[in-house]
Amino acid sequence: MKKIGRNDPCHCGSGKKYKKCCFNKDKNEGKLKKIELEKEKEIKNLERGDKMLEELRKFFPALGNDEDYNYFDFENSDNPKISEEEQQKVIEWWEKYKNLEDIDELKQHFDDFLNNNSADVIANLGIHNKIFFELLDKFIEKGRVDEIITYLIDFRKNYPEIYEKSAEFYDFEVITWHVSKDRKDEVKNYFNYFEQNPIKNEEKLFETINFLYATNNAELIIPLIKKIYKEVNNSNDLFNGHQIVDGLNVEIYSKYLDKEINTENIEKLTDELKELEIDFDDHFYDIIFWENRLKYIIKKYDKWNNSSKNEELFNYFLFEISSNFMRFLHEEKNITYISAQYYGQLIYKYYLKSFENEEVFENIFSFEEDEIDQIIGSLSKYYLSISITKSLSLLNTLYYFAEYLFVCGNFDNTEKKHLQKITTKFHNLVYKKTMKTQIKTALFSKFPIFG
């Protein structure tokens, strides 16, 4: 079936362009369908037993079930063919592995196999999906992060064909570790697999992008984005591929914030956007749109109305206040406009979720603990997991938003401290819970993150 273009007539017969009619509805329904399929898949895996073993079987079909490590169908495996003697070595290795608990013994058992077998035999072990995940978890839990990441980097260098099979997961951990160690100049060395296959690795690609935006390190990822954004944006397999262009848009329009807002400069801005060769909506090249957008960003900090009469005015309010909040973050917290937009978008999404299904938009600046807990929990969900980067970023967003509202005159000092106290409490809970399991959490140890 031919894909409908955004400017084609809508399939419903309304006569409108697809993008002006059923595009958003179809996109949302497709996203929901994908989520439901993922849920069904997860339930099936859980019914079969150990989820990690199920994931392992996708890449290593020779492995038997978790009750019987002696069963390997080496003939039907996609791994390199090995002799019967070598097959027996693999089976015996797993027999011993399943009974080991001590992490140093596990690592030594693994090292012994690597040192005494060929690359073909090692490939049959199923390393890439089970063993390293377990080693990572155990070493991180014990606080031995530097040791396991260094080990992982060496394995990446020495066994690239095996590493590549789950590279996006490993490289995300390696990248976050380098940032946490302030070894940012080395991060670019771990983008090659994202560049080679951004569609296959899209989940971890966007997690990496968001992490670097959230920690004010956009300059590390922008060169990669410029290489892959067209492929990602134009992919029919991704629902949110267009989001990869956000940073490039900000990089362009932020250059015009210090210039006079006039037709000549805005035309130059839109000409630069057109050079990206992306099929944006028509309004994205509209002079009035950009005139308003730039004015919202640079407007002085004034008191905002505490209510909106209808949904349309509420959406205008969100657009204006999130844009102005960006400048506050850029100027007062000394972060790039790319990272400032990341946080501006989070306050926008927070409000959309807060007033979801509401018809009356009043008490816009009222923040209560239970509501914050629910909204951040909801926004941080990613399929069947939780994005720690997003949850901690949202808490930082609300903390800074309290400062912003105080500067604008919407909060007094008591109200500011009330919201900041709530966000600090939740940050401490999330940080304490994840600091021993997530390398990236180390970058959020300071709260608020930018002082």
Image (cartoon, grey):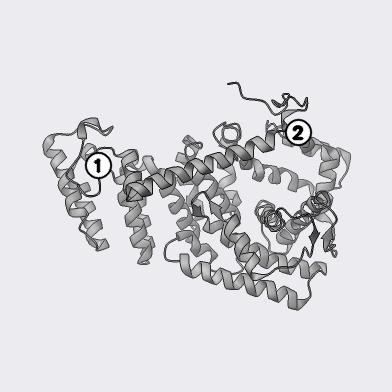
Residue 119 in percent (x, y) is at 24, 39
Residue 416 in percent (x, y) is at 73, 73
Residue 378 in percent (x, y) is at 59, 56
Residue 156 in percent (x, y) is at 35, 46
Label 1 sits on a secondary structure element that is loop
Q: Residue at x 16, y 44 (%)?
A: 70
Label 2 sits on a secondary structure element that is helix
> Which numbered circle lies on residue 14?
none
> Which numbered circle lies on residue 20?
2
User: What type is the residue that disc 1 sits on?
Assistant: Leu
Q: Which of marks 2 and 1 is nearer the N terminus?
A: 2
- Does residue 317 sit above or below 444 in this rendering? above
* Residue 215 shows in the view: no
Please identify the residue farthest to the top as the structure is shown.
Answer: 2
Quick one: 390 or 339, which is closer to the camera?
390
User: What type is the residue that disc 2 sits on?
Assistant: Lys
> Which numbered circle lies on residue 63?
1
For the residues labelled 2 and 1, say whether their Cβ atoms are less than 8 Å apart: no
